[in-house]
Image (cartoon, rainbow, N blue to C red):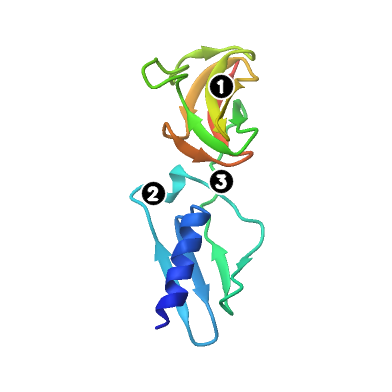
Amino acid sequence: MDLEKVEKLIGLMKQYELGELRVSDKDWEFSARRGDRPQAQQPFMIASPISVPAASGIIQAVAEPAIPVASNLKEVTAPIVGTFYRQPAPDQPVFKEVGDHVNPEDVICIVEAMKVMNEIKAGVSGKIKKILLENASPVEYGQVLFLVEAG
């Protein structure tokens, strides 16, 4: 077992915030999973394998299938990469809860990017059916934040 290679792979898991990682080479195989939460709470997709310059294997991120969305549910997605916050400040109430009605111009969360707080608006009228992230979670561009029942 090459401990240096294992440490690099674990470092990549942390860097790319992967929940699971599998690597195989000619005569060597590595598989790891981290975190207490089930994969379905943090869906992600990587379009192509990530290659490790120091290793001769191929790394693949294992993603859970996308969450099926009913036709009347609209997805509110992150327009930028950053940190998701449900409230304007730690000592203030959350913007919206599951079951709350929203209008397109209602601020429903903040995504912090490079110390700038970006207000995210609903963009749709309806009732919030599901909040897909925990407060202070990292978020990727295009990641679904909320499911809103249009109407």
Q: CA distance from mark 2 to mark 1?
A: 25 Å
Q: Residue drawn at (64%, 15%), measured in percent from left and top?
A: 104
Q: Which residue is mark 3?
A: 66
Q: Can you say whether 35 is above or below 128 in the image?
A: below
Q: Earlier in the sequence, mark 3 or mark 1?
A: 3
Q: Earlier in the sequence, mark 3 or mark 2?
A: 2
Q: Nearer the viewer, residue 60 or 129?
A: 60
Helix, strand or loop under label 3: loop
Q: Which residue is mark 2?
A: 38
Helix, strand or loop under label 1: strand
Q: Nearer the viewer, mark 2 or mark 1?
A: 2
Q: Residues within 10 Å of mark 3 (few under 14, many from 20)?
A: few
Q: Residue drawn at (54%, 81%), measured in percent from left and top?
A: 25
Q: Can you say whether 2 is above or below 114 in the image?
A: below
Q: Can you say whether 102 is above or below 57 in the image?
A: above
Residue 149 marker: 1
Q: Residue drawn at (56%, 65%), measured in percent from left and top?
A: 60
Q: Residue drawn at (48%, 68%), measured in percent from left and top?
A: 9
Estimate the x, y position of residue 31 in percent, counting from the top left.
43, 70
Figure label count? 3
Is residue 132 shown left or right of residue 78?
left
The N terminus - image quarter: bottom left
